Image (cartoon, rainbow, N blue to C red):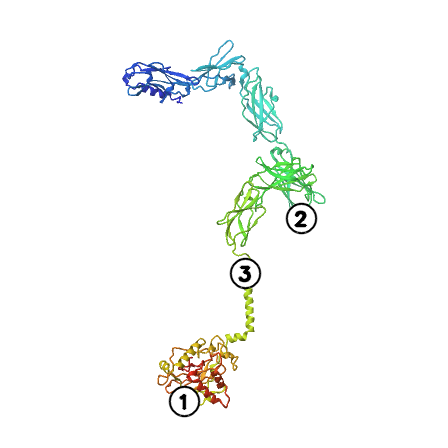
Amino acid sequence: MFSKWSWLRQVVCSLLSIYSFGVSDVLQEPCGYITPESPVVSLESSFTAYCILRDYCSAFGYLRADKVIWRIHTEVVPKKHYSIINGTVSSVTFNDTSILASPLTCNVLITGNIEQTIYGIQVALGLSPDKPENLSCIVHQHKGKKNYSQTCTWEPGRYTFLDTNYTLKSRWPIKQFADCLGANNSCTSTKVVFFVNLEVWVEAKNALGVAESDRIVFDPIKQVKPLPPCNLSLNSGEFPRVLKLSWESLFDEVPLVLRFEIRYKIIDSINWIQVLLEDTETQRDSFFIQELRPNTKYVVQLRCVTSWGGHWSDWSKEAVGFTAEDRPSKGPDLWRKISPVHSPENWTLVLIWKELNPSDANGIILKYDVSILGKPPLHFQQQFYSLNTTQLTLNVENGTYEVRIKASNSVGESPASVLLIPATNSRAPVKNLTAFPKDGKLWVEWTVPKPDVNRYIIEWYEECDNLTCATDWQLESGTKNCTFLRGGIKPRKSYKISVYPLYSNGQGEERSIQAYLQEDAPAIGPTVRTAKVGKTDALIEWEPLSVEEQNGFIKYYNIIYKTATGNETVVFVDPSKTEYPLSSLSSDTLYMVQVAAYTKNGGKRGPAFTFTTKKFAEGEIEAIVVPVCLAILLFTLLSVLFCFNKRDSIKKHIWPNVPDPSKSVIAQWSPQTPSKHFHHSKDQMYPEGSFTDVSVVEIDKKSFSEQDPKPFYLLRKEKNASEGHSSGIGGSSCMSSPRQSVSDSDEGEPAQNTSSTVQYSTVVPNGYRDQIPSVQVFSRSESTQPLLDSEERPEDPPVLGSDNSTPRHRYFKQNCNNDDTVMDEPHLDGVKQISPINEEDAAGLQTLQMCSSGPDEHDVALAGAFHPSPEGLAAEFETLRTNAVTEDEVPKCYLPQTVKQGGYMPQ
């Protein structure tokens, strides 16, 4: 739908289009026109417009109606709305006129299908006026004598979208008054005539029609709205509960009189109190307002109306006044606090009372008079105190007292308030005490214990941590069983509320309860820690939230714990608990735990805490270590006992008795006198310095192999067989190996030989410079010295004879029972002389040990040689020597010896 207010712009555009052919043609007759010209169209009816063309137009040539195009503003009207009346007339019809807009233009297609505007009109859309309703008139009084105006108002109805004129018409039965051309819904006339019946109506008119309102008839004097009374004043006089109100009236039309309406309130109140109308029906200029509060500030207003009816005046300006003082209407509310001092027999008694409300004080309180009287068996004389504070502290004896208090102002004193302070609270307490929030207040409700309760003391204080919280209280009538706390109660704060019933003969026990005016979620969550951590369990604990942090009653705790990669586990815990055991945990695992506290309005999680379970349970390590240690200890004890029982065998294997070389005796080397080789071991066979030289026989291995191969290979075989048992000097002895030696079974020395015994020998070389000894005799030594550096050296060449071809062999034979050794030395012609050695050097030589495991014929011969009789010693030794050097019968334990410098002979 096109805008109804843009018609001027559209008209200008149409005119410019129509007259666009040149300024010189502005007076030329148009090629057509539209009828009706500038119509006013109702939105509630259809509309048809006609475009009438000239047959021939000098500007465009011949025009035809079938070439006409209708446009609303710039939009083309659909062809279905067109009608061809004749060759030069085209019409367009709008059944829905709401789509109409200005301008509506008639356009023609000329040669070349060029569209040219022929004519345009401006269309006004609107509605006919509605009938005005609810016509009423009021006569206003203005300041000044007989200064009035009459204002009539009505309801015009719907908006017409057109210029509509409203005319107020009035007349007497015989006279017509001038019309009052008013605004849309009211009209004011300054010509007012009282005491006549005036007929009044309203006419509404626009381009689409005319409408009139219903006619009303009234007397203007009955429609007067007078001015409000002025110059109001309030005076209390000497009456504390009465105020006198005075005023002036501005309406004085005789015989009319005024009626008044009065309202008043306390200065800070929002509720007005209305004076009954029947009390102010008569004409007056003052009024007494009664039943007011003494010493109270009041506000008063006043308005008026004529006795014939009409309209109430506006309210007058406010008048403010005070009532006079009066004696207090009641005594102060009295209570006490008792605390023992030094002993239960003495009290610190604190008497406290509240200031009187202004409605009860009835003035300014100047002082309080307090009296206290002790009841028998106390011998406490009545005492009086006068003070201007609301508290009195006394040190008294434990007992029953009667306290009275009065408040005084400039007029008088109040009735006395009495409080009986018993030694014990022996009367019945209230029952079923509850507290709950309601309508933004904290209410307390209880069941009356007995019907003879005089009053109730409601005491409360805000619970706080580590602070001394102020206590507040209030006194309630004994007929009540429910009240709200009249102090400054805060939301999200916990209050401890106590109720004391007061009887005429004592006081009931207190009953207490905790309550919140408004709860909320806790401010913070609990801080958790571990009290004990095990392998698969942990005991966690947390500190309860302080009263300031709770913001409500804690309903329950939530414990949330999980591993780094596991799901959360939630446990609900009773609010009375401050610790909880976690079970079924994984060992040696990191856990994160939190505790959340919940009230009925929500919860809050505390900070996260991490802990790691132990790898071993408590006592598990001890269960493993203690048995192992006990087993080791038992094994050690058994080993010690075993070693103690086997100490001789152990000493024999670990700490053997090593022969001392310094005490060793070697048989004298004298082949001509073999009997010299056999001396008692304790005899000193060789005098000091008997060693003068040592011969070394060098044997050519090659020549030896060629000339006498059998003894060499036999010796090599015996040596190889004995190398596994060699243990140092004189090696090739099986007695030096870990295995048991032959000497272990020797009958001669059973306690001095072990498998690890290293035997030393002393070479006895007497006379070797003068002769070629055929036998060497070795004597076992008891030395405990360590072995000398004389290990067997296989790389040493054999000792050769003087011709460097025939090897010279030395054979030492050690019997397991004797230290005698037989040596075969058939030729000493080529012996090379070496430096002489003394007896100390000779003491370092070692003897061979017997390697043969069983006796043979040679062993038997040797046994006889080392145990001879005095008579046949020389013969047996000679036989032994002869048998020992036979090449075909080399003994198994005979090994070649090479004498080295220093007197040591490696084996």
Say what secondary structure mark 2 lies in: strand
Amino acid at the residue labelled 1? Gln
Near mark 2 (Cα within 10 A), the count class, few <14, some 14-19 or many ≥20, is: few
Q: Residue furthest top?
A: 174
Quadrant assignment, res 791: bottom left
Q: Secondary structure at mark 3?
A: helix
Q: Is residue 903 above or below residue 472?
A: below
Q: How far from the left and from the top, in percent, is residue 41?
A: 41, 17
Q: Are marks 2 and 3 in contact (CB under 8 Å)?
A: no
Q: Which residue is mark 2?
A: 344
Of badges 1 and 3, nearer the viewer stands 1
Secondary structure of the residue carrying numbered label 1: loop
Please say whether residue 387 is visible from this viewpoint.
no
Q: Is residue 409 above or below residue 685?
A: above
Q: Which mark is residue 485?
A: none
Q: Earlier in the sequence, mark 1 or mark 2?
A: 2
Which of 409/625 is in front? 625
The span from disc 1 to disc 3 (Cα, nearest Å) is 79 Å
